[in-house]
Image (cartoon, helix red, strand yellow):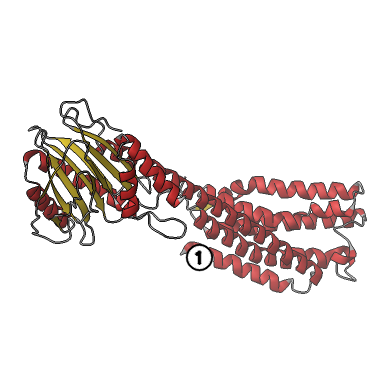
Amino acid sequence: MKVSGHGFLEHVQLLTPLFGVIGAVWALRFILGEVGAPMWLIEVFSVGVFVPICVILAALLIHLKRFGGYASVVLSSFLLVLWGQVLIVFAISLSVAAGVENIYTAPQFSIPGDIGHVRHIVGHLTFGVGLETLIGSLMGCLILFMLRRAKPPGRS
Amino acid sequence: MRDTLYVLGFLVIAGLLLFIGRDLIPSSTILTWIVTFGATAAVGVLLISLFRVQQELKQSRFELARKDVELQIAREVQAALFPKTLPLDRGLSFSAICIPAQGISGDYYDIIQCPDGRISLAIADISGKGVSAAILMSNIQARFRALIETNDSLCEVCRLLNDHLHDFSEPERFATFFVGQWRPGSGRFEYVNAGHQVPVVVGDGTMQLQVGGPPLGLFPNRTYRCGAAELKRGDLLVLYSDGITEATNPAEEEFGEQRLRNLIEKNTDQSVRDLQRIILDSVSAWTRRDPQDDMTLVIVRVEDEHRLLGRME
């Protein structure tokens, strides 16, 4: 499968640094939660905040490296959102398994009566991925469109 | 086409996932996601817009710098067209200057000593200002120089110049032109005035050097009449462009021909160079600002024959 002339693995390679950033933010948030850091600090390192930032950076990378077009932005958005949601789900699962109450299992982000956060996890993997992919794609394509107008590819 | 299908596929899958999980995420979380994405997109758009403005600014600065360089080159090329040395030992002393209003000038003056000993002097004011007028000025200069050296009839020179300008410039372009010719030893000054400001002559009696014809380039196939004046030792001839007499003060009053004439008559005992400085200082004091039009001034005084004279001042 080739999107904008590039294979799936090439897209993954392009996005590797961004996967790393999201992973680092996720880990940092997890650690900060465990060491009892203030809530405002934990909220700053949010996967939910860094995923859209990474989508913008992906659009920038695609533009600067002349990697592809809008289809690549949509695929990148999907992959980054999926990676972010998988990490969140993993954190929720870990917290549930360890019986720890933290920001991932906080009641305000969960559904009442959801034992084991099963519906919460499924919600992230369905609604979360779906919504963020749609909005992320829209945003990424807008950014790519503006970048192309501001600095057409190949113009030094 | 395949990319479009992929995009549509992704969007359909996203839509399906959205539908499947529609009741599984609290509305506060959904709102947070939307706000986060929206705010990030807004910041991204803002940053790109700023980048674009900065790029355009950089481009504008580059264009401006390039135009400055081009203008500087044009200025240097034009400066090279004006005479750097003036005829010596021919019974006349000269002072000449051209001050452009926009870096380069549409005014022109020239003083040429022809191989047969004649001294020709010319002043012209090309309609318009800036680069286009300057290009036309250089064209007139080249044509005039070629014609005057091989043709001692000023009427013929003006006729040929008029036809040349009419044929090779746009209809709205024209030039006022005054050309004079001095034969050393004769005391006779021949001239043609093609619609230019009437020069100021200070000497014995009042002379009006206005015989000639219409400005050059306005009408085709025109003939010009040639005038003549007797100039004696000490007589002063001042050629000028309208940038001098039409210079306005803050109250929009023009400097005027009468004021110029009075100034010249009051300072006839000054050297031509000092007289030039006095006139320019007076105009500058009158306007109290940078020149709004090109100003050209050529001052000629009849001196003793065989006296060392004339240097570019």
Residue B148 quadrant:
top left
The residue under label 1 is B4
- The chain letter for the residue carrying disc 1 is B
Counting labels gives 1
What percent of the width, then of the height, locates residue B250? Answer: 47, 57
Q: Quick one: SS at disc 1?
A: helix
Amino acid type of the residue tagged 1 in the rendering: Thr
What percent of the width, then of the height, locates residue B48? Answer: 59, 55
Residue B313 in sight here = yes
State whether residue B305 is above or below residue A2: above
Left or right of A39, for residue B288? left
Residue B26 in sight here = no
B273 or B24: nearer the viewer? B273
State whether residue B34 is above or below residue A144: below
B154 or B59: nearer the viewer? B154
Q: Residue at x 78, y 50 (%)?
A: A26
Left or right of B266, for residue B183? left
Left or right of B11, for residue A96? right
Question: Tag 1: Cα neighbours inside 10 Å, few (<14), some, or many (≥20)?
Answer: few
What percent of the width, then of the height, locates residue B81? Answer: 25, 38
Looking at the rendered image, the quarter that the C terminus of chain B falls into is top left
Q: Which residue is drawn at 16% across and 59% down?
A: B214
